Image: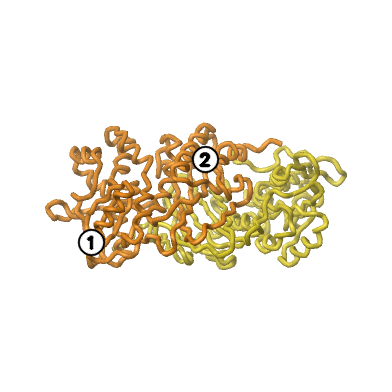
Chain colours: A yellow, B orange
Amino acid sequence: MTLPPEFALIARHFRPLAGAGALDLSDDAALLDPPLDRQLVLAADAMVAGVHFLTDDPPDTIGRKLLRVNLSDLAAMGARPLGYLMTCAFPRGTGEEWIAAFARGLAEDQREHRLSVLGGDTVSTTGPATFSLTILGTVAPGAALQRRGARPGDEVWVSGTIGDGALGLLTLTGKLPPDDYLARRYRLPEPRLALGAGLAGVARAVMDVSDGLAQDLGHLARAAGCAAVIDADSVPLSAPVRRALHGNPALRVGVLTGRDDSELLIAADPADAPRLRAAAEAAGTPVTRIGRFIQGEGVTVLDGSGAVIALPQAGWSHF
Amino acid sequence: MTLPPEFALIARHFRPLAGAGALDLSDDAALLDPPLDRQLVLAADAMVAGVHFLTDDPPDTIGRKLLRVNLSDLAAMGARPLGYLMTCAFPRGTGEEWIAAFARGLAEDQREHRLSVLGGDTVSTTGPATFSLTILGTVAPGAALQRRGARPGDEVWVSGTIGDGALGLLTLTGKLPPDDYLARRYRLPEPRLALGAGLAGVARAVMDVSDGLAQDLGHLARAAGCAAVIDADSVPLSAPVRRALHGNPALRVGVLTGRDDSELLIAADPADAPRLRAAAEAAGTPVTRIGRFIQGEGVTVLDGSGAVIALPQAGWSHF
């Protein structure tokens, strides 16, 4: 008895990604023994073609980006990846080669981050390709990093470099000259899992930067009932972003408010700076101090002369 | 500091649905203490406007249908609901009243089934509204109902009535006269959670019927390495479906292969029939014996005279 096309697709391309508990993706649900003495950490993100990725992005990078933005949420909680469920809405007529490449990308990142697929759903859509992924991770009880917890006087730190993804999108859409490094950072963000895992007991608050540094810092400040001030000149930038800003200083606002960073934003007591640097070194992920939390509300961005940089919009909103 | 529109929408309509562990939907992820001595059961389903529901369906029924098709997967595993994560891709310009009604529907079903939202994502799309929901449930270790396990000689049972959803869609699209009962069954399937919970140790195999009775029975038979024969005349039908078939016998194939049943398909040893009937009575959900498993492969549907009914397609496939 031949399987109908939908189930044959799943069997060929997604079943090889399935791990223990997934029941070969052929049951109604997955069955999981929760790890002993661990809390579960759960997050879900969706991506739509033309909104979160480009329709002509290589399909293997699309699956990986979807997984990585979710892994970045685990990193921001200090959690370790366990598994994921994914739903895919493919436009009718999507070629099987496209789906095969999409699944190959997922397989690559699964190996790197040691997790597997537990379940999901594959459907058709009359609109753009749309994906949703729910990730599961684990953390020692009480060790999860949360957004609340910053206090006036704490310092603001950020991992890696800011603005690569936002400028990568501009290079891929012809608004900036082509740049392989920036294109890759747009398509394949780097979840900071090792850093996140090292921040328990070191950071007061952590979150993932995904909707613009200024806006996300506003979330961290609001959760703590305080304000934040950062120095734009201290925000860490990659060499390609520095070059682009040199030619076009107006891009600075885009760097501070653009999407697709997937870096960690960290609040820490100044006395913990040495421990924070040690954790970053152990993880192999650079961290940079960019400002501090103060009494009040809102986010202020200062330039090198101490003047306020006006941000027409602090970050991305879908509506 | 005012929240950007996307976060304000989430705060107004989805935060009230959040339960313990959701961290007010304002952190990177949810934190959950897994229930002691239970296995986790996890499933995910997606729904696309125009594919899984009608664009003009009342928005409160759309959220509820999404939750209910996932609850039906838990029912098929004998699991108890715990919580869910949901991603919503709304077309830009979706009115806030629409979103409010969507959330009200979810709130109603959350109360009925005692679960709450743990996390998710709200994004915009240039295509049809697209939703994805990952549900978590719990089951006693070893008690989960699975698809494999039927044996030749076992009987095939089904809960409730078959074909209501498929014919409901026909009434709502003008292909059959309007019928409130069938429209409701299309929009609001009834997850058979109480029945599923009562089937541990009674049924040999259970699955949720969602892609057509004939096709889904094929999955159950394939998982067991055997074949199934059912008697079309014994398939339980609601009064509105019987009336529709009386006027148009050709609809019978649509009833046997149509989507949107959300009933349970059950394999049981004939000796366990009395216990199965008792479990159904305790759950308040009727069950009907419709056939049996035999050696071989495939699904055969017989009419009242014992002749084979040809099914051009056993069920729904997206591709």
Q: Residue at x 71, y 65 (%)?
A: A283
Measured in 3D between alpha carbons, the distance from the residue under mark 2 to the one under mark 1, in whole angstroms, is 49 Å
Q: Chain of mark 1?
A: B
Inspect the image, locate mark 2, and give the three-letter code of the amino acid beneath it. Phe
- A275 to the left or right of B294: right
Judge from the rendering whether residue B192 lies leftward or rightward of residue A128; answer left or right.
left
Q: Could you say where residue B120 lies in the image, as x and y percent from the top left?
A: 55, 48
Residue A249, above or below A106: above
Q: Which mark is residue B270?
A: 1
Question: Residue A283 shows which numbered tag?
Answer: none
- Above or below — where is B21 with respect to B177? below
Question: Which quadrant is home to the N terminus of chain A?
Answer: bottom left
Q: Earlier in the sequence, mark 2 or mark 1?
A: 2
Do the residues marked 2 and 1 share a common chain?
yes
Q: Which residue, given by chain and number where applicable, does mark 2 sit on?
A: B90
Whether residue B137 is visible to the viewer of this picture, yes or no, is yes
